Image: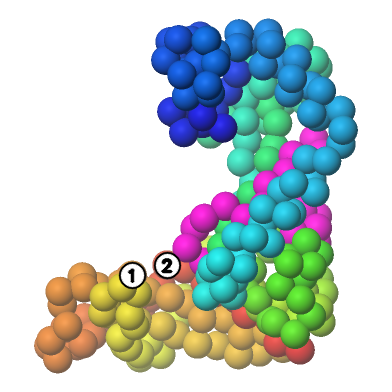
Amino acid sequence: MFCCLLGEPRAEGLTRIDPLDLGRLLGLDRAPEVRTLRRRTEELAAKGRSARLIEDLARRHLAAHEKAAGIFYVDGHVRAYHGGRELPKAHVARIRLAMPAELDTWVADANGDGVLVWSAPPGASLVAELRLVTAKVRQLVGDKDRPTICFDRGGWSPKLFKELGLKGFEIITYRKGPAPKEPHAAFKAFTFTDGQDALTTTCSRTGGSRSATTVGVAASPAARSPASMRRPAPDPDSSPRETTVTRARSHT
């Protein structure tokens, strides 16, 4: 824990910290070596209680931040693997290479603070992980709440949307592929507050079991005068530049 607070979250980080200085924080003559820390970590992992620890920490976090428990952001993160085991390759965006890697599923609250994390099976899809995410979130928030789950287009699945809607979840995600062109007259400007006032334009379309809202690029927070509400001249192809993001919301 002290290593994490000092900016060294891995065992190898002990080699970059003075063992005498760290030992004073621990109340010891000197800090343990990397081999000792790895051995102790393996002993703790062998007890098989890591999942319970994370869930208990998540409950405590949400109890202390109830207002942030209405929206949960879900994403998968690829970590390059440099160990000796054979793992399937995955695309590591940070270095733009395909190499052995692990996939972690992260769940954050409305403030962006981490709530849950676990290692996903090799080759796991975000659609499959979302079913596990919603099951864990339901255990944390209870049966009465209707939280919103936000994820990227990797989780786009109409079948999944229907399942999550029936289970009492709202959804915000991206549409795969280019968004359909909308006439400029279909967009309406409105003001929203997220720490400070800002302007945006939206175009709502409803059909079937879900509604979609195409969200425009927000204007500068300083641009709040009536003149800033005026719409720009339409493009020749009648497709406004504001059409950038699609918001899908499930309905039961």
Q: Secondary structure at mark 2?
A: loop
Residue at image point 79% right, 80% down: 143
Give amino acid for label 1: Val
Q: Which residues are magenta?
A: 110-133
- Classify 97 as above or below 51: above
Question: Mark 1 — residue?
Answer: 217
Q: Nearer the viewer, residue 124 or 66?
A: 66
Residue 205 percent across, percent down from the top left: 55, 88
Foreground tag (2 vs 1): 1
- Mark pair 2, 1: CA separation: 7 Å
Residue at image point 62% right, 55% down: 115
Residue 187 percent across, percent down from the top left: 37, 87
Residue 129 percent across, percent down from the top left: 77, 53
Q: Relative to 131, is 248 on the left or the right?
A: left
Q: Nearer the viewer, residue 221 or 92?
A: 221
Question: Mark 2 — residue?
Answer: 244
Give amino acid for label 2: Thr
Q: Relative to 143, is 25 on the left or the right?
A: left
Q: Residue 156: which quarter of the image?
A: bottom right
Of the image marks 2 and 1, the number of the one nearer the N terminus: 1
Answer few, some or many: residues within 10 Å of disc 2's Cα (few below 14, many 20 plus, some between 14 and 19).
few
Q: Are marks 2 and 1 in contact (CB under 8 Å)?
A: yes
Residue 177 in sight: no
Q: Residue 184: which quarter of the image?
A: bottom left
